[in-house]
Amino acid sequence: MAVKNIEEYFDSHPKWDRELRLLHDMILSTGLKPAIKWGAPVYTLNGKNVVGLSAFKNHYGIWLFKGALLEKNTSMLVNAQEGKTKAMRQIKLDADHELSVNDILPYVKEAIENGKAGKEIKKVVTKKELIICPEFEKALDEDKELKESFDQLTPGKQREYADHISEAKREATKIKRMEKIIPMIKKGVGLHDKYKNC
């Protein structure tokens, strides 16, 4: 059953009702706006998600959408999916943990400060190495026009061609592919350009 509002969310988790309400009131005191997103309470600043609440059978907690940016308040933060989740962090609580909103409020305040400052998680772009198989390397060495045309292509287009040839298992297939793509390279077009305007 999809919950329509925050009250319904609390009612659907009676085990954690008191704790969720305490967290909810504490978050509202910061000026964040409440909403229901993905079936749970989410609190926003200027339309951007800052924190959310969650409740499960054995635990409840608070999500910080850009928790990875927190620097001062980090000791309670957990990455729910190590290696997968870049920005989001959570504070996970259970029956053994006596909830103190005063412990959690600094996390929320720092997340709000980061939101107001426009801080973002930087995307890490890894540059993929260009690997040219021996057959294609030989063709480039023997044909000056081909080499010059290939060098003028963008790194992405160079990689598309190099990968297209390298992925062939048999040498005969590699040669066939090279015969097809050499005129394209000399024209300065990318391997997949003809599909990009469709």
Image: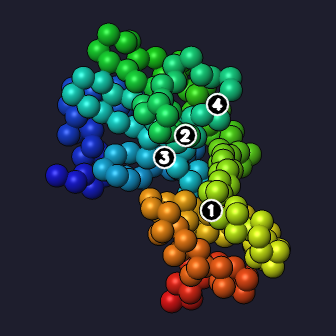
Name the element at disc 1: helix
Q: Where is residue 187 shown, x and y percent of the image?
A: 72, 87
Q: Residue under circle 4? A: 70
Amino acid type, callout 2: Lys
Q: Disc 4 marks which amino acid?
A: Leu
Q: Is residue 13 left or right of residue 125?
A: left
- Nearer mark to the viewer, of 3 and 4: 4
**In front: label 2 or label 3:** 2
**If you read the primary sequence from the N terminus, does the residue marked by circle 1 or circle 2 appear first?**
2
Q: Which badge, 4 or 1, is on the more N-terminal residue?
A: 4
Taking the spot 30% from the left edge, 50% from the top edge, the residue there is 39
Task: Indicate the secondary structure of the residue bearing disc 2.
Answer: loop
Q: Are the residues at dot 4 and dot 2 in contact (C-beta closer than 8 Å)?
A: no
For marks 3 and 4, give the CA distance.
17 Å
Q: Residue at 35% of width from left, 36% of height from top? A: 54
Residue at screen point 69% across, 79% down: 185
Task: List the residue tagged with mark 2.
Answer: 86
Residue 54: mark in rendering: none
Per the model, the C-alpha gap separating discs 4 and 2 is 13 Å
